Amino acid sequence: MRGAALSLALVAAGCAHCPLCGSPWKHDMESGDAARAESAIAPGSEVTGVVTCHERIAILPTYRLAVRLERSDGSLVARTDPMPVDALPCQFSLRLDEAAARSISPDDVLALRAELTSADTTILRTDSPAFVRVGELLASGSAAPELVLSRGR
């Protein structure tokens, strides 16, 4: 009983430390808010990458490419409008609007997916998404993700 009272007194005084790592249990709200503000994603940030295909296909003038940035549950964060494609591989650029920038943090891991369509019919799509950490993706000099298209199943 005496040990529990001492532990409670230390926690209340803000002196307690984690028994595993030794870090203080006291939470400084101001520094946490400042850290979140520094790590915020700026609206207008761009996610860029390359879409490619291992199969040989003829690219028709009606083909359109769309790229989506999604959470692990499949909810949409941002997407490109379907854009004409001249050849594969091709570059894409996905701009994050204010709502998308506010809804994610640099530590989030999101999925990039691509789809090639013609007249609302899927021609090719990514079988498995490219998982990316947002902070690394937006960092200057980071490698652009490559999305590989294959036949829709």
Image (tube, grey):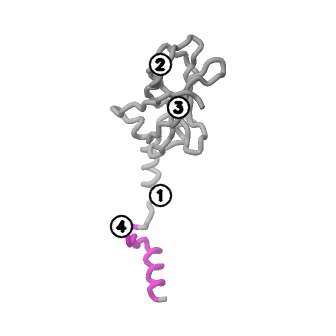
Q: Position of residue 103 (x, y in %)?
A: 55, 42
Please determine whether, in this image, residue 59 is positioned above or below residue 1. above
Q: Position of residue 2 (x, y in %)?
A: 46, 88
Q: Residues in magenta?
A: 2-24
Disc 1 residue crowd, few under 14, some 14–19, many 20+, Cα 10 Å:
few
- First reached walking from the N terminus: tag 4 or tag 2: 4
Q: CA distance from mark 4 to mark 1?
A: 20 Å
Which structural element holds mark 2?
loop
Q: CA distance from mark 1 to mark 3?
A: 42 Å
Q: Which amino acid type corresponds to the residue marked 4 in the rendered image?
A: Cys
Please determine whether, in this image, residue 50 is positioned above or below residue 98. above
Which structural element holds mark 3?
strand
In this rendered view, identify the residue nearer to me: 20 or 143: 143
Q: Residue at the location (50% across, 33% down)? A: 43
| Marking on residue 126 | 3
In the picture, measured across the screen, residue 147 lies left or right of residue 98, that is: left
Q: What quarter of the picture does the C terminus occupy?
A: top right
- First reached walking from the N terminus: tag 3 or tag 4: 4
Q: CA distance from mark 2 to mark 1?
A: 56 Å
Can you identify the residue that label 1 sits on?
A: 29
Can you identify the residue that label 4 sits on?
A: 21
